[in-house]
Image: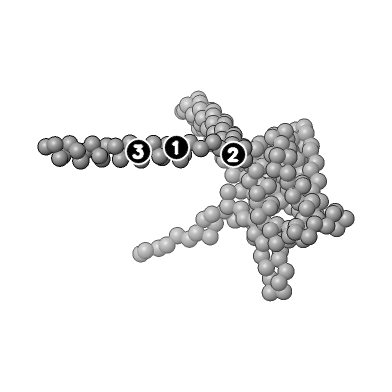
Amino acid sequence: MNRNRWIWSVTGISAAIGFMLTVQLTSKPQSSTTAVSSYLDLRTQILEQMQEHQMLTKELAKQANQLAQFQASQGNNAALQKALANDAHTVAAEAGMEPLSGPGIVITIQDDPNLPYVPDYAGKFQGVADQEISQIVNDLFANGATAISINGQRLVTTSSIRLVTGLDGLSTLQVNTYPISMPYKITAVGNTDLMQAVLKVNEVATVLNLMQEDCLVTVKKGPAGVTVPGYDGPMPGSWAKEVNHG
């Protein structure tokens, strides 16, 4: 019995020492860089949660409005058809099938050899154009943009932004599989203040300038500020065919 107690005592002491060492190792003061990084990560998470909350609130309001329309049109075929037509219009707009106008910004990116030559960055944009533009688009959507097009190509959930290299070794930027050329014009409808802020925080213009790319941001406020065209490409299932098992 005494031997067993002794074994359990040693085990308990070892566990306690291990726990104390773990706490000591993980409780080292954070460097200023780590603290700033943690703060930025936390701020990003909070902003994402706020945006998700706003989206869910809007979705709940939309669903409640649709339910009210359907309830009000019970027993009235004309009213029901109108409610369904309104619903179809809303779905098409949210899917990006219809043009959208409103306050927004236009970002124009084009080569500018007059910018200072920085050997480590100059000319790099042509090889990473799809990555850079995708990042800009994602940041805009996450910070106030409700609709975006690139050189007239509307971005929807199935859109792609890719660099395609031909047999001649030259790369072409494709949006929705359509080739586009410079200047690249990103048009975004939405909250102009939030979109301008994220471009400034991420130093988009500065980074592009290092690669000798001019980046001009034009803000247009008012209900007719900018217009993003509707998507006119194929949607998922467009080529689907019914299979006859008979």
What kind of residue is marked 1?
Gln
Quarter of the picture holding the N terminus: top left
Circle 1: element type: helix
Against 36, residue 125 (above or below) is: below
The residue at which mark 3 appears reads as 17
How many residues crowd around disc 2 within 10 Å: few (fewer than 14), some, or many (20 or more)? few
Q: Quadrant of residue 200?
A: top right
Against 53, residue 226 (above or below) is: below
The residue at which mark 1 appears reads as 24
How many residues crowd around disc 3 within 10 Å: few (fewer than 14), some, or many (20 or more)? few
How many residues crowd around disc 1 within 10 Å: few (fewer than 14), some, or many (20 or more)? few
Quarter of the picture holding the C terminus: bottom left
Q: Are marks 3 and 1 in contact (CB under 8 Å)?
A: no
Left or right of 127? Residue 240 is left
In the foreground, 115 or 185: 115
What kind of residue is marked 2?
Ser
Against 20, residue 212 (above or below) is: below
Residue 210 visible in the shown view: yes
| Mark closest to the chain's N terminus, 1 or 2 | 1
Q: Position of residue 211 (x, y in %)?
A: 77, 55
Foreground: disc 3 or disc 2: 3
Q: Position of residue 154 (x, y in %)?
A: 67, 49
Circle 2: element type: loop
Circle 3: element type: helix
What kind of residue is marked 3?
Ile
